[in-house]
Amino acid sequence: MQQSWFGLFVVISLLLTACPAGGPTTACDPTGTGNLVVNVSGLPAGLNAKVTLVGPSGTQTLTASQTFTGTPAGSYSATAEKVAQSDPLIRTAYSPSVSDSPACVRNGQNATINVSYSPIPSSNKLWMDNSNPPSGASPVLAFAASLLGSTATQSPSVSAGTINLRDLTFDQDGNLWGIGGTTADPNLARYPASALGTSGSKTRDRSINISGISCLPGPARLAFDANGNLWVSVPCANKVVRIAAAQLSASTVTPGVEITGLDGPEGLAFDSAGNLWIANAGAKRVVKFNASRLNASTSGPDLTIQSQTPSPVINTLDANLLAFDASGNLWVMAFGGNVLYRLTSSDQGGSGTKTLTPAIQVSVPVSAVLEGMAFDEGGGLWITYSAGKFARLSSTQLSTSSTSGSPTTPERIITSSSIGSAGALALYPAPAGLPLYHKLP
């Protein structure tokens, strides 16, 4: 009798091991059919999920909850991707969490996989670093898209108690990256998206110092490439360095790639082909390095563009910050002349050195302080403005040139008593049509 009970115990143990609850197996009743329910929750009405279900029936893409009856028995696994709700200015991004996957469908039984979405706290907002903040104000501010529909005086939706930052951007998950603003701060700092939905003191979860940078004031601007590598301009050292994606969890890093021979580089931007464009501010030039050269240290651009004002008074335009629009035009912010000018795809072609007069040059009032810019979903360009303000140039305004004598007044201006001087601007997620790492489809 003891041997019989022992044998039965062994059989039961083997069955449980072969087909654990919710576990993958070819022994989950490989013959027969059962029912599978995929529950999707957390999304607003009208927004589709993006769930991939893999099992004996093949691979399927689901956009909402679905029940599969009489489905072949076996193991089913689900993965899900971030999705974004449409908005005329800045979308809301939702991140998924999948539980009970893989699920074991057994003959004649039911199994369930749950996919729960939640909004990413840093999304649906325009973010800025806040230089010289008024007493009681924070060094990083965010304004919800709902506050930006027209000219108004607004209070920030989030006042983030971070270190002082000199520039900021986002990664694909909505985490905020910035350059430390003082010598006491790390060169790079990251604040997790989960902490960015409310005001208050924030704790960075990454602090990175870049070896080999001893000049002051140190790094100035940063940009992710399509592979998640972080590029940093260092004007005082006349170079741009690459921090590989794999290095971004370290506390001290040595750049694997350096671009040298530059003259006070500031703004960085990648085009849709992966080429790196640099605002070579000291030389008042925009320079391009082809994507094929970016895996090793190098010097000497593939293309240099000098831009100038139209006659009768021809002056060389500054080049400080860069941003691509959804049509592939490269917009250059010229701090000194308070001008934003457009370099078309044709302007961006060729190699060597060329001088051109951009067809579109938009002047803004002399009181504006051009320190940051970011395109939104509607093709408008948000720019820093005068003290306590930031503003939006509409897509229509960006199609018409203006002069310093008759500058373009932005179609909407946001004023806030919390702003000292707005610096870098960024929004998450970036519009789908932009060649930015933190875009979403």
Image: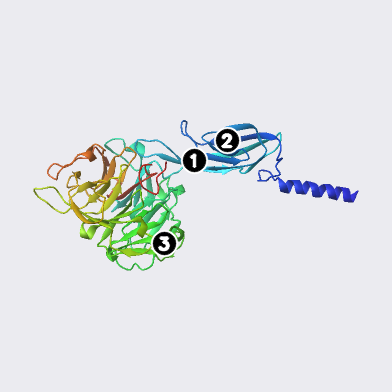
Choose mark 3 or mark 2, whichever is in front. Answer: 2
The reply to whether residue 183 is in sight is: no
Q: Which residue is mark 3?
A: 208
Q: Give whichever of discs 3 and 2 has the lower sequence position.
A: 2
Indicate the quadrant where residue 344 lies.
top left
> Distance between the Cα atoms at labels 2 and 1?
14 Å
Q: How many marks?
A: 3
Rendered image: mark on residue 118: 1
- Please indicate whether residue 34 sits to the left or right of residue 257 in the image: right
Q: Position of residue 63 (x, y in %)?
A: 51, 35
Give the amino acid type for the residue marked by disc 1 in the picture. Answer: Ser
- Please indicate whether residue 258 sits to the left or right of residue 24 in the image: left
Q: Quadrant of the C terminus?
A: top left
Label 1: which secondary element: strand
Q: Which residue is mark 2?
A: 39
Q: Is residue 257 above or below residue 326?
A: below
Front-most of 155 and 189?
A: 189
Front-most of 135 and 37?
A: 37
Label 2: which secondary element: strand
Indicate the quadrant where residue 316 lies.
bottom left
Label 1 crowding class (10 Å Cα cut-off): few <14, some 14-19, many 20+? some
Q: Position of residue 271 (x, y in %)?
A: 33, 50
